[in-house]
Image (cartoon, grey):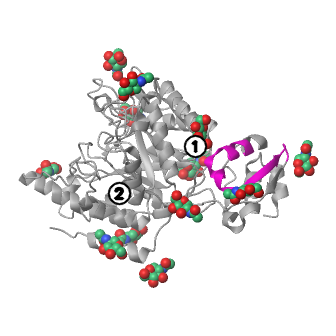
Amino acid sequence: MAESGTNWARASGSLVIVLLLVGLVGSQLLASEEQPQLLGRRSLQESVRRFLAVNDIYVLNSTYDVNTTSVTVVGTAIGPNASVTGYWSTRGRQILDFYGKEVFFSGVSWNGLENIDGAPHGLWARSWQSMLDQMIGLGLNVLRLPFSGSILAGGYMPQNINYYANPDLRNLTSLQIMDVIVRGAGARGMKVFLDYHRLNAGYEHEWGLWYDANTSETQWINNWLFLVDRYNNDSTVVGVDLFNEPHHDEAKPPGHLGPEWAPDGVNATINWRTSAIRCANAIHKVNPNLLIAVQGLDLYRGQYGLWGGVFLGQLDAPLNLTVPNKLIFQTHDLGPSTFNQSYYNAPDFPSNLPAQWDRMWGFLWDRNITPVWVGEFGAKFDPYCTSDRCAVVFRQEQLWLGELVRYIQNKSLPWTWWSWDPTSEDTGGLLADDMQTLRADKYAYIQNLTYPGFSIRNASTSLPTGIRTTGA
Ligand SMILES: *[C@@H]1O[C@H](CO)[C@@H](O)[C@H](O)[C@H]1NC(C)=O
Ligand SMILES: *[C@@H]1O[C@H](CO)[C@@H](O)[C@H](O)[C@H]1NC(C)=O
Ligand SMILES: *[C@@H]1O[C@H](CO)[C@@H](O)[C@H](O)[C@H]1NC(C)=O
Ligand SMILES: *[C@@H]1O[C@H](CO)[C@@H](O)[C@H](O)[C@H]1NC(C)=O
Ligand SMILES: *[C@@H]1O[C@H](CO)[C@@H](O)[C@H](O)[C@H]1NC(C)=O
Ligand SMILES: *[C@@H]1O[C@H](CO)[C@@H](O)[C@H](O)[C@H]1NC(C)=O
Ligand SMILES: *[C@@H]1O[C@H](CO)[C@@H](O)[C@H](O)[C@H]1NC(C)=O
Ligand SMILES: *[C@@H]1O[C@H](CO)[C@@H](O)[C@H](O)[C@H]1NC(C)=O
Ligand SMILES: *[C@@H]1O[C@H](CO)[C@@H](O)[C@H](O)[C@H]1NC(C)=O
Ligand SMILES: *[C@@H]1O[C@H](CO)[C@@H](O)[C@H](O)[C@H]1NC(C)=O
Ligand SMILES: *[C@@H]1O[C@H](CO)[C@@H](O)[C@H](O)[C@H]1NC(C)=O
Ligand SMILES: *[C@@H]1O[C@H](CO)[C@@H](O)[C@H](O)[C@H]1NC(C)=O
């Protein structure tokens, strides 16, 4: 740390802040020097101003004497709460917190804001506060929050909220409800990833690309800039999930081409890779601290996979961002109740699954390319199952989930379960239909997979041994 003089001369502010904090709280921050991009390429004063603005600073009790060449700390510091403060970065396949400590996260998607209801689901039954309390109590410390572009237009009002249970949401627009949920999650020590789930509210509008006849690609990017600016002062929103499940859907509109993962300048209008880069780089101009999650495709050069889960293109045309150490890839793996795949019916199922995951996205982790976040996985475990076919799917789903849980645990991957509430038709929820009761049969699979405090636990006590399912 003593080399700070040279760093000060070289940096445009960010290192100064990092070194300043080293001075304040000592060895806890030593690793931070490896993250000079943390505060971006801003002027020194701007960096300090921003740093003081984010909620990370609430743990510091100091005043600052700032000028354009140096920062002087006056006063004393209260140690930061490393588990909840600050933005995150990456190093190879690792995610690091503001202080350079490796982060593991376990969370859940709470759907509804992307629906025509324009509000997280279940608020007709209980308060939003009790929902978030229950999540964090279960070890779910990241909230993936799906929304549609529709709620960004001024005045989109939510439906199906019980205002007796949620009096503080009365008369709020959907966007203002998003503000409340983000603030509430932050207050509970959770982090949030905003998930641009679809262009327009309601499932029927999903057609697989990040633009349509009414929303241009530029509008999609501008919508992101609007949102990112809105939460720019709050590191609760630690990242963005650029677009959900780009995929092929030849039916909408008839004959349209699905997304490709192609080199620069190739297939320009359907090139998810270059569009994601454009969007991410624009977002980073507003807030260079955010993690950018990019999902895979459903199909690459004739090879099919689950929506969001095909990353083979990265081997041919790597996707890189201008701001380094901010990219994470997000894969989805929904089970037999959502998509029937031939390999669920193979004789060596479920032990054939890891090789499939390795090939489609696990290699990103194996080769230390980027972190891989299992952004959606979830089982239906249909409580109303009576038919023979449904019993087959039920059993397959148990085997699939057991195998996936072991796979996630073996690599200590970050994950978010899909979904919190039971209204998602494909998977149901972690909550039962009453919107209150935990589906213990589902939670049993992920309980030992959680990372409380964003830390990995004592591995010897966390192996989900009871879950290894070795056949019927
Ligand atoms: C912060 O410092 C001020 C002035 O020294 C002191 O009065 C106050 O109690 C401190 N706050 C905390 C939370 O320590
Ligand atoms: C900036 O602050 C440093 C440290 O307090 C001081 O030595 C220096 O004179 C200041 N420069 C200006 C231009 O105020
Ligand atoms: C607020 O909502 C209530 C019903 O929830 C409605 O009666 C009232 O008109 C609304 N007020 C405004 C200013 O929109
Ligand atoms: C840090 O924040 C977490 C989450 O809010 C909390 O559980 C923990 O007690 C805090 N640690 C300290 C030292 O305040
Ligand atoms: C675009 O908007 C028009 C008018 O609201 C609507 O009829 C049409 O379905 C929309 N197209 C898409 C792709 O959403
Ligand atoms: C961010 O700014 C908004 C609007 O100024 C304010 O309500 C909110 O409390 C701020 N959040 C933080 C964490 O500073
Ligand atoms: C361009 O798109 C077409 C149609 O989707 C596809 O067949 C072709 O392989 C793509 N080219 C490249 C280089 O990705
Ligand atoms: C882009 O990413 C790939 C894979 O992560 C890496 O090998 C390559 O060096 C990167 N290229 C640039 C220009 O950063
Ligand atoms: C899934 O598809 C396979 C063919 O690939 C078929 O044999 C099997 O019956 C299907 N499973 C269900 C539950 O429909
Ligand atoms: C964990 O992964 C390694 C390779 O990374 C593999 O050799 C091993 O079999 C896996 N263990 C389990 C229990 O899946
Ligand atoms: C892990 O748990 C075992 C058994 O409870 C205990 O003996 C060991 O000390 C723990 N290790 C760590 C690093 O906490
Ligand atoms: C989870 O871990 C606890 C503590 O080690 C263990 O008792 C329990 O059996 C595990 N749960 C499952 C489903 O494996």
For mark 1, what is the residue? 321
| Residue 37 located left or right of residue 255 | right
Q: Let me know if residue 352 appears in the view.
A: no
Q: Amino acid at mark 1?
A: Leu
- In the image, is residue 119 above or below residue 401? above
User: Quadrant of the image for the N terminus?
Assistant: bottom right
Disc 1 on helix, strand or loop? loop
Can residue 217 be found in the magenta stretch?
Answer: no
Can residue 50 be found in the magenta stretch?
Answer: yes
Label 1 CB-ligand 8 distance < 8 A:
no
Q: How many marks?
A: 2
Residue 45: x and y in percent read: 78, 42
* Residue at figure coordinates x 56%, y 45% from the top left: 320
Q: Amino acid at mark 2?
A: Trp
Residue 454: x and y in percent read: 50, 61
Residue nearer the viewer, 400 or 108: 108
For mark 2, what is the residue? 357
The segment highlighted magenta reads: 48-69
Residue 35: x and y in percent read: 66, 55
**For ligand 7, which image quadrant applies?**
top left
Residue nearer the viewer, 455 or 346: 455
Residue nearer the viewer, 376 or 178: 178
User: Quadrant of the image for the C terminus?
Assistant: bottom left
